[in-house]
C-alpha cells in the first residue's frame, strides 16, 4: 500500500525528521488561506498528491511566486488526472494538494531504504546526485550510487551511516545529522513494515539544516493486519477500479495498455503468456493471476474484470490444471461466457489433469470459444483474432 507524500511526511515528523512546513488543501479556494494564513512568505510549492513518481516532469509540482499563480495552479491540478511516466495511461486523480514553504537549498542528495530480495536484508541506498534525474544517474553512472546492507539482528550500524555520509561528501555536523536521520529512518522502516522509503531529494539548506524535501513511502500489504495505524490511510482513488475489484475477489490483476485480455493461473505462467503475446505482435491488456484454486465463480469474476476494460478485443485464457482439474475449469469458462455475455473472441489453452475432457466440454458447449493446442498456438490465435485474421 502506497502513502501520499503528506502522509509519509507526517510519519517522518513523528520520528523527528525535519520536513518543510506545509498544509493539505482539497479546494482551490483554500490554497490562498493555506499560503498566507499559515505558511507566510511570497513563494510556495504546490504538489499534486498522487501515488506515482515523476510528478515534477509532468507539471504536478509547481513553484509559484504570487497568490494569482497559486490559485491558477490549484485550479489547474485539483479535480484532474495527472499522467506521469510511472502511472497508468489514464493517469491518477488529483483530489488533494500539498502547499509547502520554499527553502533556500544549498545541495541535493538521494536517500532510500528498501528490501533487497537477493540478500534478504534492508538496503540503504544513497547518492550525491539527487533530484528528478536519479533514475538516469543509476543507469549511466552507477558508481555514484552508494549502498549499505543492514544486518537483520544488529540493524543499521553507526559506522555504516558514517560510510554513507563520507561517500556523500558530508563533513562536520552534517555527518552526525545524517547518522541520526538514518538510524531514525531504519526504525521507522522496520517498525512500520515498510517496503520502500525514499527521500528525493534530501537537501541541505543554506543555513545548514538537513531536510526531507520529498518522500515516497510504501507499506508491505502482508503486514497491514498488524499495522493498524495505516487502516485509514488507504486511498482507493489512486488504484485502478479493476484492480480494487480484483483485490476484493482475491485475484491478482494489473491493468496494462494493450488489447488482449489475459486470464492465467500462476504468476510465472502469466508473465510467460504476456511475453508470447508480445513476441507474436500483440499487446497484453492486463496481468491476471486467478490462482491455483480457481473456481467457476472465480473465472466468471475474472472475465467481468477483464471485459470492463473497453480496449479489450480478445481474451486469452491459459490454465494449467494442477490443483484444479481442466474439466472444472472448462465448466467455469462456459458458465462465465454465458453469464457475462462475452462479445469478443475467447482463446482457451488448457493443460494438465483431465485436459481432454475439458477440451471436449468446450467443443460441445456451442459457444464461440477458440481452443488452442499449446501456449504458442494460443498466443498466435489471440493476436490473429485481434488483427481480424
Image (cartoon, rainbow, N blue to C red):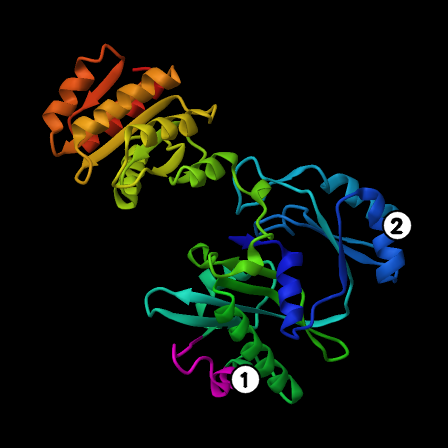
Residue shown at the point (67%, 42%) measured from the top left: 94
- Under circle 1, the secondary element is helix
Locate residue 369: give its quadrant.
top left
Q: Is residue 161 left or right of residue 203?
A: left
Tell me which numbered mark, 1 or 2, is placed earlier along the sequence: 2
Q: CA distance from mark 1 to mark 2?
A: 42 Å
Q: Is residue 68 left or right of residue 141?
A: right
Locate residue 358: give its quadrant.
top left
Horizontal and vertical percent position of residue 25: 76, 49
Image quarter hosting the C terminus: top left
222 in magenta: no
Q: Nearer the viewer, residue 62 or 322?
A: 322
**Residue 286 position (above or below residue 8):** above
Q: Is residue 14 left or right of residue 347?
A: right
Q: Pointers 1 and 2 in contact (CB under 8 A)?
A: no
Q: Is residue 217 visible?
A: no
Locate residue 303: give its quadrant.
top left
Q: Is residue 93 left or right of residue 307?
A: right
- Under circle 2, the secondary element is helix
Question: What residue span does the magenta drawing correspond to?
Answer: 148-163
Kindly identify which numbered label has been placed on residue 166: 1
Residue shown at the point (33%, 32%) measured from the top left: 298
Identify the residue position indicated by label 2 in the image: 67
Q: Is residue 163 visible?
A: yes
Residue shown at the point (76%, 65%) measured from the top left: 21
Horizontal and vertical percent position of residue 200: 60, 64
**Classed neighbour count for the residue bearing mark 2: other residues with Cα under 10 Å, few (<14), some (14–19), many (≥20):** some
Name, please, the residue furthest toward the bottom: 172
Residue shown at the point (63%, 49%) measured from the top left: 57
**Classed neighbour count for the residue bearing mark 1: other residues with Cα under 10 Å, few (<14), some (14–19), many (≥20):** few
Amino acid at each position: 500500500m502506497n502513502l501520499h507524500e503528506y502522509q509519509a511526511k507526517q510519519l517522518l515528523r513523528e520520528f523527528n525528521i525535519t520536513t518543510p512546513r506545509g498544509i493539505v488543501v482539497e479546494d482551490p479556494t483554500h490554497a490562498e488561506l493555506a499560503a498566507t494564513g499559515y505558511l507566510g512568505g511570497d513563494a510556495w510549492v504546490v504538489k499534486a498528491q498522487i501515488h506515482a513518481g515523476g510528478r515534477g516532469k509532468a507539471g504536478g509540482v509547481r513553484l509559484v511566486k504570487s497568490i494569482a499563480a497559486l490559485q491558477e495552479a490549484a485550479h489547474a491540478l485539483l479535480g484532474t488526472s495527472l499522467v506521469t511516466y510511472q502511472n497508468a495511461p489514464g493517469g491518477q486523480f488529483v483530489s488533494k494538494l500539498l502547499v509547502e514553504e520554499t527553502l533556500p537549498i544549498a545541495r541535493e542528495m538521494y536517500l532510500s531504504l528498501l528490501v533487497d530480495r537477493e540478500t534478504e536484508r534492508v538496503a540503504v541506498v544513497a547518492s550525491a546526485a539527487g533530484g528528478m534525474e536519479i533514475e538516469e544517474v543509476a543507469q549511466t553512472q552507477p558508481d555514484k550510487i552508494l549502498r549499505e546492507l543492514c544486518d537483520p539482528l544488529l540493524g543499521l550500524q553507526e559506522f555504516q551511516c558514517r560510510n554513507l555520509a563520507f561517500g556523500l561528501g558530508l563533513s562536520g555536523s552534517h555527518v552526525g545529522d545524517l547518522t541520526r536521520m538514518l538510524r531514525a529512518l531504519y526504525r521507522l522502516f522496520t517498525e512500520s513494515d515498510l517496503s520502500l522509503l525514499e527521500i528525493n531529494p534530501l537537501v541541505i539548506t543554506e543555513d545548514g539544516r538537513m531536510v526531507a524535501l520529498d518522500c515516497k513511502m510504501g507499506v508491505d500489504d502482508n503486514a497491514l493486519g498488524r499495522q493498524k495505524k495505516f487502516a485509514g490511510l488507504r486511498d482507493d482513488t489512486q488504484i485502478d477500479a479493476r484492480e480494487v475489484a480484483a483485490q476484493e475477489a482475491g485475484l491478482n490483476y494489473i491493468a496494462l495498455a494493450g488489447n488482449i485480455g489475459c486470464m492465467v493461473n500462476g504468476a510465472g505462467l502469466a508473465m510467460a503468456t504476456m511475453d508470447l503475446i508480445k513476441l507474436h505482435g500483440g499487446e497484453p491488456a492486463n496481468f491476471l493471476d486467478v490462482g491455483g484454486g480457481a473456481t467457476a465463480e472465480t473465472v466468471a469474476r475474472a472475465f467481468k474484470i477483464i471485459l470492463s476494460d473497453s480496449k479489450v478485443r480478445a481474451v486469452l485464457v491459459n490454465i494449467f490444471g494442477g490443483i484444479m482439474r481442466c474439466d472444472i475449469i472448462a465448466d467455469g469458462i462456459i458458465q462465465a461466457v454465458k453469464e457475462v455475455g462475452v462479445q469478443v473472441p475467447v482463446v482457451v489453452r488448457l493443460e494438465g489433469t483431465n485436459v481432454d475432457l475439458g477440451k471436449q466440454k468446450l467443443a460441445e458447449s456451442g459457444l464461440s470459444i477458440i481452443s488452442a493446442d499449446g501456449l504458442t498456438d494460443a498466443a498466435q490465435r489471440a493476436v490473429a483474432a485481434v488483427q481480424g485474421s
